[in-house]
Amino acid sequence: MVLSNSTFTETMGWLEQELSKAKISQKEILTAQLLLEETFLRLSKGAGDPADFSVTVTLHRRFGDISMRLESLGEQYNPLVEMTEVNEEKEDAYGLAILKAHREEVGYSRKNGKNLVSIRIHKSASKDFRNTVIGIVLGIVCGLLLKETVSADALEQINVTLAGSALRMFMNALSMTIGPMIFISVIAGITHMSNATDVGRIGGKLIMLSLVKLFVCTVLGVVFGLIFFSDGLSGLAAAVPQQDMDVKPGLSLLDMITGIIPANLIQPFATGNVLQMLFLACFFGIIVNRAGERANVVKELIEFFNFFFMDVMNVVVKFIPLVVFCSMVQLMLTTGTDALLSLGIVLAANAFGMALVVLASGLFVTLAGKLSPVPFLKKSLTFAPIPFSLNSSNACIPMTLKLCAEKLGVDSRLAMFSIPVGLQFNMNGSSFYTAMIAVLMARSLGVGLNLNTLVTLTVSTFLVSVTMAGCPGSAIIGLSTVFEAVGIPTAAVALFLPIDSPAGMFRTVGNVTSDVASTMMLACSEKQVDKETYTAE
């Protein structure tokens, strides 16, 4: 499509029509139109003759990703270089804000005498999963080939020096990032709840209902792990490197409670004690709220660092496909296909466990609202493909709100409050998975699971689950904390990296369904449910 001043309206209509066929959101379509308009205007200014200027616009689709490409002849001109210069005109400032807000989606290059601008419109939700699957397959093939063709000494060097080093570097990067991210995100969550949503009677009720459900699902995960993995899995035990097999004694519940207050502010971050970080974050968050307007500058800094550390984490998790490749190579070199069978059993157990979490959510709705669980379960299962494919509770919020208001009969204003606020306290799927995996590895590595250890495991999993972010990869972080509390080598966390993405899809279904269940329970207690809508087909 050729875009010029005379074809502007026609081109915008064509773009909307084509993107609507791709079934992307209206917000993404509007953003694409704004970026196209602003980029075209800047290119035309750089061309010297805006009246006769035109660009060729093409759409590209690749593995679910959608991007737009602009080509224009003329002298070299990068419309993104001088993004910091703003004219006094309001239009220029507005256009600059649009470009700066989407700087990562826009790129420039020069080729064959043409200025080329690429704009990413839509990123496939399954891209990360696809890359992880590719890493798994390539890792298996590469590991098996090396095992058949390379000498034992060379295999040892590849296993320890290459694959082992890559895994260690990734876990170090994860540990380096997760502490500050949890600390800042919890403080930000507390300040947001106080200012943006004015948590009072309804907010307190929502949090209490959610925490009760979260604790029940944590206990359910422990019990399920004890029953399903009564003998552990030898394939996973053999895959833990021998140098990392020194199992430290786990903390007692008393030690964990008394040790939650650190001796100094540096200790939690230096030792990676997430429970101490959580205590400090809650304590500081309450103090910031008590300061009122005097803390406005501090709140702005907290907001900045919250986004900053989330961006850092997003960069770190982009390496997961490479780490998965190295992990599968290492598994093939050490245990062969036995580990694959063990991981397959874990995935099957996780899928079955998430079904239990969904059923438990329906049961809670029945107990709290005196409603039949059948409509809730039917509509939740119909909705399940959305969180399953997005693999992010946060990304599901708009669709979850629509489900509550249009399908389950919840008052829309209550849902707009309950769904975002309750999300952090409804990581039931992640909590179940973390507890189940901790029991599995304890049984596989011979860590004693007496009553004191089980209580410690349950409480630590429950507390860590509250800090988990609603995005891919968060459960891996929680696993390392719970492993350390129970006395399981934290190096064992790397064993579950290859299956974290598919397992995360099931966990997201459990998390989102639990969030919806809490909203339903709150709505029932406040008599804000339209029962005709709830029971309607």
Image: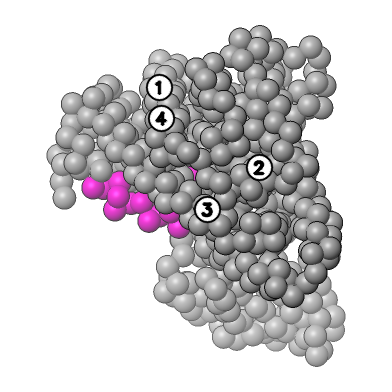
Of callouts 3 and 2, the N-terminal one = 3
Residue that mark 3 sits on: 343
Q: Magenta segment, which residues?
A: 378-393
* Residue 42 in sight in this render: no
Disc 4 + disc 2, Cβ < 8 Å: no
Q: Is residue 128 left or right of residue 47?
A: left
* Residue 345 in sight in this render: yes
- Secondary structure at badge 3 equals helix
Residue that mark 2 sits on: 492
> Which part of the image, by quadrant, shows the N terminus?
bottom right
Of the two numbered discs 2 and 1 in the rendering, the one whose residue sits closer to the viewer: 2
Residue that mark 4 sits on: 223
Of the two numbered discs 1 and 3 in the rendering, the one whose residue sits closer to the viewer: 3
| Percent position of residue 281, x then y | 67, 22
Q: Amino acid at mark 1?
A: Val
Residue at horizontal 52 percent and vertical 63 percent from the top = 126
| Percent position of residue 407, x then y | 25, 46
Residue at horizontal 79 percent and vertical 77 percent from the top = 109
Work out how far the residue at label 4 is from the one at label 2, CA to CA, in angstroms: 21 Å
Disc 1 + disc 4, Cβ < 8 Å: no
Work out how far the residue at label 3 is from the one at label 2, CA to CA, in angstroms: 13 Å
Of callouts 3 and 4, the N-terminal one = 4
Residue that mark 1 sits on: 212
Q: Amino acid at mark 2?
A: Ala
- Secondary structure at badge 1 equals helix
